[in-house]
Every structure is written in C-alpha cells, then in structure tokens.
Image (cartoon, helix red, strand yellow):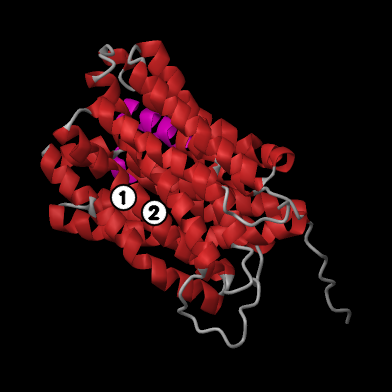
C-alpha cells in the first residue's frame, strides 16, 4: 500500500491563509465595536459606567502579553492562533449573554486576553510568510485587519437595522470564524523559527528591540488619540454639524486601511528607514493642519494624512522585530507589543489631561511631537540597506 505523498504548500497559499486569519481577527474586534451601544442599552449603563467597563479589555490584553509570548514560543503559533481565534469569537457569545456589569467586565477581560493571544501568534505566522518572500509584506496583512473593520461595522449596521438580536449576530460571526479557521489551518506554518537552545523563555529585550518598541509607542499614542478623540475634536474644535462629526474618524480609518495595502511596495522603493521617517512626517503634517486650520475640509485633509502616517509604522516594526536572532519571534513580538501598546493606552488619557489644562487644539499639537519622535528614532534603526 502506497503512503500518501505530502505536497509542499506554496508561499501564496501560506499568505492567503495567514491573511484570512488577520481578517477574522479584525472581524471579531469590529463586530464587538459595532454593538457597544446595544450592550450599553441592554445593561442600562451610563457613559461613566461604560467607560469603566471598557477598561477591562486593555487590562486583559496587557496582562496576556508575557504569557502569550511564552506560550507561543513553547507550543508554536499555529496552535495558539487557532485556539485564540476560537476563544476570541466564543467570548463574543459570552458578551451577548452578559446580564450584569460584573459578568461583562469578566468577559471583556477574557476578550482582551484572547485578542492579544491571536495578535501575537498571527503576527508570528506573518513573519514566517514574509521570510518566504524575502521582502516586506507585513503591512498588507494589517491592511486586511483594517479592511475587516469596515466589513464588521457594515455587518453590525445591517444587523442593527434589521433588529437582529445581539446573540444571533455574534453566533453568525462565530460561524464565520470557525469556518475560516478550519479552511486556513492546513496552510499555516506548523513550526516557528527555532529559539536559541540556551535562551530562557523570559528574556529582557535588547537595545534594538527597545528602539523598535519606542517607535511603536510613539506612533500608537497618535493612533490611540485618533481612535478615541476624532469625533470630539470635530464636534468641539471644528464645530462640525452632527452629520459630519464622524467624518474625521472615517477619513483616518480610510487612509490607514488603504495605505497598508501599498506600504510594502513603498517600503521596497524607499527602504525601511525612509518609509518610517515619511510616516512620522505625514503624521506631524496632518495633525498640524488639523490644529492650525480647524475648519471642516482642512481638518478632514489633516486626518487623512494622519491615517496614512500611522498605517505602516506598527506592521513594519513588527516585521523587523520578528526577524531578530536574539530570541524567538513570538517573544520579540510580545516585547515590542508590550512597549508599543502602552502608547495606545496612554494616548487617549494624555489628550484629555492636556485638554483639561490647556485646550483640545493644543493637546493635538502636542501629540504631533510623537510623530517627530518616530522620525528621530527611525533614523537610528540599523537595517540591511544602511
């Protein structure tokens, strides 16, 4: 009896499979985001109560960082991303079933924990695909995550419009995730890059990884501020009519998603260092335009530029971190993500603090300094192109 022949999997199949996992990850996140008002109404939460409840998500994410790096290094990113995405979508069901604030807080903590498990492990898979191509393709994966945000929001809008119950909506998403993971699994990488035999599982990141983490930190401060304060800025500073309050946020998301699909091509043309510097420059220019000319169309233009500016920074930094030879890719990604995501958490409250002691316009101008820091720190990166 002849044994079955194991045919090699093409790099395109690997890329499509890992891209699908990025999309499913983004779909889960945006599905939750689209139904936050529904959850608030269901549990009769005030804005203050909702703000406190939502804090459980980043807490779960941050606490998962060291564990996820260790687990992925130990059992491999294929197993972790499979388990994490299934858990991520299952927690949506648990959110839909929540009947109290305490229950929702516990579930959102788990939601954040699963989100980061999926994030670290799927980026580890992406590093392996990028190694097959021997060129930058990381930004395109993150572009799929952003694209999934639009799909998730659109599905959520349709579900709300059709008065579909929260639990039914989330069961639909669970079905998509289970099917997607099942199809993609055979085409993912069974093994990650080998970890040095004498390296402990928990290790302090070296100077180069710290530098990459700081670049991500500065960019994510800008990104976090835009996610949480775009609408407020357009309402209170720009003075936009109600129908246009979300215009800045939409502009930001649009260019962030689009630029991620061309960022790899631009990186090959410009080189990593110049691409990161250009990203920081776009962020600075965009924020200054919105601050100096706070009228509707100028502010929209500014937010478009900021979206393009922050789009490629984190994917490119992840791509470099995952190629380090000093530790396992998952551990390197966890280290950089820990530093970087702190910026995402710091950005929104920093805007509020600065606005409280000065003004919202001045706080946005101050955030522009983070774009300057991206330019400065990127100039110190040592790359193959010099």
The percent position of residue 225, horizontal first and vertical second, equals 33, 38
* Label 1 to label 2: alpha-carbon separation: 6 Å
- Label 1: element kind: helix
* 260 inside magenta stretch: no
The local crowd at label 1, few if under 14, some if 14 to 19, many if 20 or more residues have their Cα within 10 Å, is many
Decide if residue 164 is on the left or right side of residue 339. left
Q: Is residue 251 visible?
A: no
Q: Is residue 14 visible?
A: yes
- Label 2: element kind: helix
Q: Which mark is residue 341?
A: 2
Extreme-right residue of the structure: 2
Q: Are marks 1 and 2 in contact (CB under 8 Å)?
A: yes
Which residue corresponds to mark 1? 345
Q: Identify the residue at image location x=15%, y=34%.
A: 356
The percent position of residue 214, horizontal first and vertical second, equals 44, 54
Q: Identify the residue at image location x=81%, y=64%.
A: 8
Q: Identify the residue at image location x=49%, y=81%.
A: 201
Query: Within the image, what quadrant is residue 164 found in?
Result: top left
Q: Identify the residue at image location x=63%, y=57%.
A: 382
Residue nearer the viewer, 223 or 110: 223
Residue nearer the viewer, 282 or 96: 282
Q: Tell me: residue 278, above or below residue 337.
A: above
Q: Tell me the magenta residue range.
A: 151-167
Q: The N terminus is located in which quarter? A: bottom right
The percent position of residue 95, horizontal first and vertical second, equals 27, 51
* 166 inside magenta stretch: yes
Q: Tell me: residue 339, above or below residue 268.
A: below
The percent position of residue 290, horizontal first and vertical second, equals 37, 21
């Amino acid at each position: 009896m002849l044994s079955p022949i194991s045919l090699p999997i093409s790099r395109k199949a690997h890329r499509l499979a890992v891209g699908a996992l990025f999309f499913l990850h983004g779909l889960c996140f945006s599905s939750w985001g689209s139904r936050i008002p529904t959850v608030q109404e269901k549990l009769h939460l005030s804005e203050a109560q909702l703000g406190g409840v939502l804090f459980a998500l980043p807490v779960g994410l941050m606490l998962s960082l060291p564990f996820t790096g260790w687990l992925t290094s130990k059992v491999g990113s294929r197993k972790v991303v499979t388990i994490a995405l299934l858990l991520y979508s299952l927690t949506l069901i648990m959110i839909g079933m929540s009947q109290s604030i305490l229950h929702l807080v516990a579930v959102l903590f788990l939601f954040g924990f699963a989100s980061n498990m999926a994030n670290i492990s799927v980026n580890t898979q992406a590093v392996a695909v990028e190694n097959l191509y021997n060129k930058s393709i990381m930004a395109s994966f993150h572009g799929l995550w952003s694209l999934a945000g639009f799909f998730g929001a659109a599905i959520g809008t349709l579900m709300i419009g059709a008065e579909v119950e929260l639990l039914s909506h989330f069961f639909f998403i669970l079905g998509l995730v289970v099917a997607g993971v099942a199809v993609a699994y055979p085409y993912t990488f069974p093994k990650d890059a080998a970890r040095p035999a004498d390296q402990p599982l928990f290790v302090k990141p070296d100077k180069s990884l710290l530098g990459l983490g700081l670049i991500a930190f500065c960019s994510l401060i800008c990104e976090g501020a835009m996610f949480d304060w775009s609408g407020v800025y357009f309402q209170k500073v720009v003075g936009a009519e109600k129908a246009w309050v979300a215009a800045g946020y939409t502009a930001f998301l649009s260019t962030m998603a689009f630029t991620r699909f061309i960022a790899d091509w631009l990186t090959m043309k410009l080189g990593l260092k110049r691409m990161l510097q250009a990203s920081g420059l776009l962020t600075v220019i965009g924020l200054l335009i919105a601050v100096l000319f706070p009228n509707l169309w100028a502010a929209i233009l500014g937010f478009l530029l900021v979206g393009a500016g922050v789009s490629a920074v984190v994917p490119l930094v992840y791509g470099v971190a995952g190629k380090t030879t000093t530790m396992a890719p998952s551990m390197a990604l966890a280290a950089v993500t820990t530093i970087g995501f702190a910026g995402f958490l710091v950005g929104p409250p920093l805007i509020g603090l600065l606005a409280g002691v000065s003004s919202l316009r001045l706080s946005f101008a101050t955030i522009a300094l983070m774009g300057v820091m991206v330019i400065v720190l990127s100039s110190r990166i040592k790359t193959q192109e010099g």
